[in-house]
Amino acid sequence: MFSAVVYSSCTGSCKKYAELVSESLNIPAFELGKAKLCAEGKVLYIGWLFAGKIKGCDKAFDLYNVGAVAQVGMGPVDNNSEKEGRKNNGIDASIPLFCLQGGLNMKKLPLLLRLLMIPVTKSIADKLSKKEELTEQEKATLKMAQTGEGEPASWDVSDVVAWCKAH
Ligand SMILES: Cc1cc2nc3c(=O)[nH]c(=O)nc-3n(C[C@H](O)[C@H](O)[C@H](O)COP(=O)(O)O)c2cc1C
């Protein structure tokens, strides 16, 4: 049984996802490091992607009994996302990894990260604007990359909630 959602969030997307899951499962959501949990309860960890790494993931595994992980990034989720996420973060097949699209808000980022993201968003915008047909998630990513802020195509947590309910 899942007893809590733990998250790490820089600009609010993971916090929002954590709150949505927490409401649906009727369990509390805590920021990473702030939860005092009993050892038996499993935790869903939600962290944001930083160059392919899920922020706080290693620490979450050290501190809690992590039963599932959700990674949140500005990019579109595709058939490779889960495989890449597992490889980049050393998450084996025994732990489910959910891949969710989050938003981008350059204005909320610390200066150093904002500077890091300027060339990244430019290159994403260049690449995506050349594509003829875009999925809803790609459209959302393109808007984020072009304007420096935007929401994901949806905030759908139904798969995560269903899996946590069943386990
Ligand atoms: C320095 C930096 C690196 C990022 N790297 C990735 C990445 O590798 N893949 C991705 O999809 N999104 C990446 N992002 C976008 C964030 O993961 C995305 O904006 C996420 O929604 C942020 O979550 P938060 O609002 O909870 O902080 C990066 C953002 C920053 C600032």
Image (cartoon, rainbow, N blue to C red):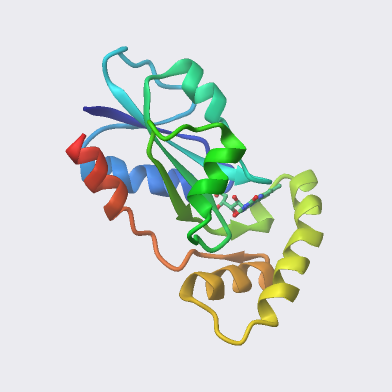
Numbered marks: total: 0
Residue 54 image-quadrant placement: top right
Q: Quadrant of the C terminus?
A: top left
34 in relation to 134, above or below: above
Residue sitting at the far left: 166
Where is residue 24? Give x, y as percent: 22, 46
Is residue 89 left or right of 110 when viewed as pictured?
left
Q: Is residue 12 visible to the viewer in this orientation of the structure?
A: no
65 in relation to 67, above or below: above
Residue sitting at the far bottom: 132
The residue sitting at 68% across, 46% down in the picture is: 51
Viewer-proximal residue, 155 or 123? 123
Where is residue 123? Give x, y as percent: 77, 67
Residue sitting at the far top: 39
Residue 112 image-quadrant placement: top right
The residue sitting at 54% across, 22% down in the picture is: 59
Viewer-proximal residue, 75 or 105? 75
66 in relation to 159, above or below: above
The residue sitting at 66% across, 75% down in the picture is: 128
Where is residue 131? Give x, y as percent: 64, 82
Is residue 59 left or right of 155 when viewed as pictured?
right
